[in-house]
């Protein structure tokens, strides 16, 4: 059986392991199929590189940098990473500034600009395509990273990783489910519920449960109340974020072992 993919959070405002710095933002290392992918780059390149050094992650060994959306707390370390590794592939979407896109073409080995349609990147990794934000005035378009890793005959694991889930985490999972034609096992990243009321939080928890998501890792901009709601619903299958958290993305448990769905007034 092949080793399951590994995801290590490198940058997060949620506190993590001792000796690592926490600032607002998000970045994670994904290791799968012999590829090393940096998902987002946090808000501060110096802090990102220091956390990477503590964790033994060499930026020069990265194969691909995937940027979810053009907010400062997800692309703040971009210059630092490219300075260390101009030979990587950089993936962003059409919602980024066209001037930035033009400037970046000469700063990496390959620049991939994703449109609205899903797109395969490397074996086992795909972009959801650029999805519009829930509020076009406040939420930018965003792309999620879809992981699809075969571990053995008939055994596979899937995940949707989000930066902030500005389109809605359930919408990103729905897109991933449609792309793979099966339920998503893991939903990981910022769920953007930090300003949501109890009804909206309960609706999101219920939606992911109904989509048959087996494991959740709600962090970054999810907010304390929403993280607590997911922990109540998912129990041990809700895992904490924070810099240094390492996740072995194992396949889902038996299909009859699903989280409880809270009522609309859960908080």
Image (cartoon, grey):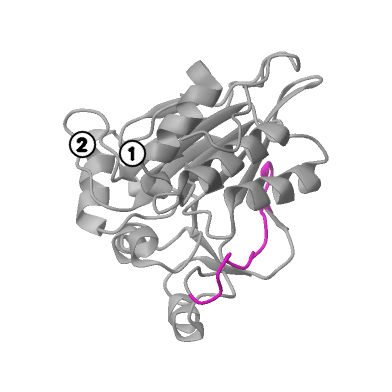
Examine the rendering and report whether any part of residue 12 can be seen.
yes
**Residue at (43% x, 41% y) in the render:** 29
**Residue at (69% x, 44% y) in the render:** 123
Q: Eyeballing the image, is 106 above or below 198?
A: below
**Residue at (64% x, 47% y) in the render:** 170
Image position, residue 15 (x, y; %): 25, 36
* Measured Cα–Cα span from mark 1 to mark 2: 13 Å
Is 204 displayed left or right of 128 in the figure?
left
- Marks 1, 2: nearer the viewer: 2
**Residue for badge 2:** 20
- Residue 132 on the magenta span: yes
**Residue at (49% x, 50% y) in the render:** 63
The one nearer the camera, 172 or 161, is: 172
Q: How crowded is mark 1: few (under 14 residues within 10 Å), some or many (20 or more)?
A: some
Is 193 displayed left or right of 262 in the figure?
left
The one nearer the camera, 228 or 40, is: 228
> Main structural element of the magenta stretch: helix, strand or loop?
loop
Q: How many marks?
A: 2
Q: What span is colored magenta in the figure?
A: 121-137
Residue 17: mark:
none
Q: Eyeballing the image, is 232 above or below 213?
A: above
Examine the rendering and report whether any part of residue 33 can be seen.
no
Say if mark 1 contacts mark 2, CB within 8 Å.
no
User: The N terminus lies in which quarter of the figure?
Assistant: top right
**Residue for badge 1:** 57
Q: Residue furthest left?
A: 19
Upstream in the sequence, badge 1 or badge 2? 2
């Amino acid at each position: 059986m092949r080793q399951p993919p590994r995801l290590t959070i490198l940058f997060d405002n949620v506190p993590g392991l001792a000796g690592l710095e926490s600032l607002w933002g998000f970045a994670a290392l994904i290791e799968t199929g012999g590829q090393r992918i940096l998902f987002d780059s946090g808000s501060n390149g110096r802090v990102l590189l220091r956390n990477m050094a503590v964790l033994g992650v060499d930026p020069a060994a990265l194969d691909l940098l995937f940027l979810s959306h053009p907010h400062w707390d997800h692309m703040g370390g971009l210059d630092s990473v490219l300075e260390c590794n101009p030979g990587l592939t950089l993936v962003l979407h059409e919602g980024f500034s066209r001037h930035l896109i033009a400037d970046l073409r000469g700063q990496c080995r390959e620049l991939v600009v994703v449109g609205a349609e899903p797109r395969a990147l490397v074996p086992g990794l795909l972009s959801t395509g650029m999805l519009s934000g829930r509020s076009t005035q406040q939420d930018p378009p965003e792309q999620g990273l879809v992981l699809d890793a075969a571990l053995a005959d008939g055994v596979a694991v899937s995940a949707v990783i989000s930066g902030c889930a500005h389109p809605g985490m359930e919408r990103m999972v729905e897109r991933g489910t449609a792309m793979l034609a099966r339920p998503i096992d893991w939903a990981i990243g910022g769920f953007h519920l930090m300003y949501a009321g109890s009804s909206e939080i309960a609706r999101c928890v219920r939606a992911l449960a109904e989509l048959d998501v087996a494991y959740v890792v709600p962090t970054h901009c999810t907010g304390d109340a929403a993280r607590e709601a997911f922990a109540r619903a998912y129990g041990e299958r809700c895992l904490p974020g924070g810099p240094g958290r390492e996740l072995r993305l194992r396949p889902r448990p038996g299909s009859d072992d699903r989280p409880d769905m809270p009522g609309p007034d859960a908080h």
